Amino acid sequence: MGNQKTWETHFQIRYNQALLYDLPKEGFDQPAWRKPPTRRGYSGEVTASTAKRIRTAVDVLLQKSPHRYIFNPVTNRRQKFQLSFTTLTISQSKEVPASEGHEALKMFLQHFKRPWRKKQLSEQIGSYIWKAELQARGQLHYHLTANSFLHLAEIQRVWNGIQRRRGWLDEFHAKFGRWEPNSTDVHAVYKVKDISRYLMKYVAKQEYRQATTNPEAGFPALLEPVRLDAKVWGCSEDLKGAKPFSCVLDKETWENICNAHGNGAIKIREKERCRFLDVSGPEHLLSYSQSNLYQQWKS
């Protein structure tokens, strides 16, 4: 009986969802034979563990990005805003290695991280996630999701300037006589009904392409994962290694859960090792003390 563990119920906050699960107060015993995981280099693809980290980063990003109103200089009016979704495309036809594209992306992000600029068209970038993909023509392009308003004119000016310095616009200029291709796109995603599912599916997906066939083998062509020679995704420092907010369930929070469930405000789904609480704004279920801890976690 001396090895009997004391279990505690934990309450974890996610975007429009919460979890109840039990953990031993003393923690889990690690076998002596288990070795610490070895850190490997970038595989250039979205593995199962990579997709899990991306989904966690997306969930934390959403919690750090409440709906707010901003002034849009394009429409000259205030609008509801949560996240911006930006696409950066490389304009030349010759394929650019992902390692070179990654350097260009870092220069682009560095511009919007600066606290000063000549014209304040965009907000200083805060929390963000980026994903590298290949177009159907095989050329690299990037998707950037941020909780800052980024002005399309500034995005296009900065990205095309980076492209021009790297020679990626020479082909376009020779054909059209100008240096301003339509290489960027930006839109807000506040109109998406289920933003969490939309982003997790879009950012965490792994691309596949038809594998080369061996005529002598007699097998049909299979699909193989697309691999890049650089990082396939990244995020801001506040999202690196981020984990959802979790706390030990206290009496006040449990009473709030019971009252909300009794009123039909939440739906509880029983799983083998936890219970999912489907609720809009699960942070409102927290007790006063735990709510303060949650606000510290978000900042």
Image (tube, rainbow, N blue to C red):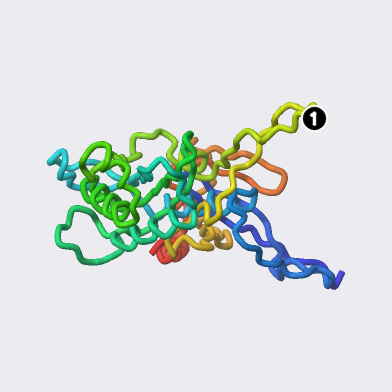
* Residue drawn 55% across the image and 62% down it: 247
* Residue drawn 44% across the image and 64% down it: 238
Give the quarter of the figure containing the C terminus: bottom left
Going by the picture, which residue comes out furthest to the right?
1
Which amino acid does the dot numbered 1 rest on? Glu
**Element class at badge 1:** loop
* Residue drawn 59% across the image and 48% down it: 227
Going by the picture, which residue comes out furthest to the left?
76
Task: Tell me if residue 34 comes above or below residue 86 in the rendering.
Answer: below
Q: Is residue 288 visible?
A: no
The reply, left or right, for residue 222 in relation to residue 207 is right
Percent coordinates x, y for residue 218 in the rendering: 80, 26
Q: Is residue 177 visible?
A: yes
The reply, left or right, for residue 164 in relation to residue 105 is left
Percent coordinates x, y for residue 141 in the rendering: 42, 45
Give the quarter of the figure containing the N terminus: bottom right
Percent coordinates x, y for residue 175 in the rendering: 27, 37
- Along the line of sight, which residue is nearer the eye, 229 or 49? 229
Percent coordinates x, y for residue 30 in the rendering: 78, 69
Identify the residue under disc 1: 216
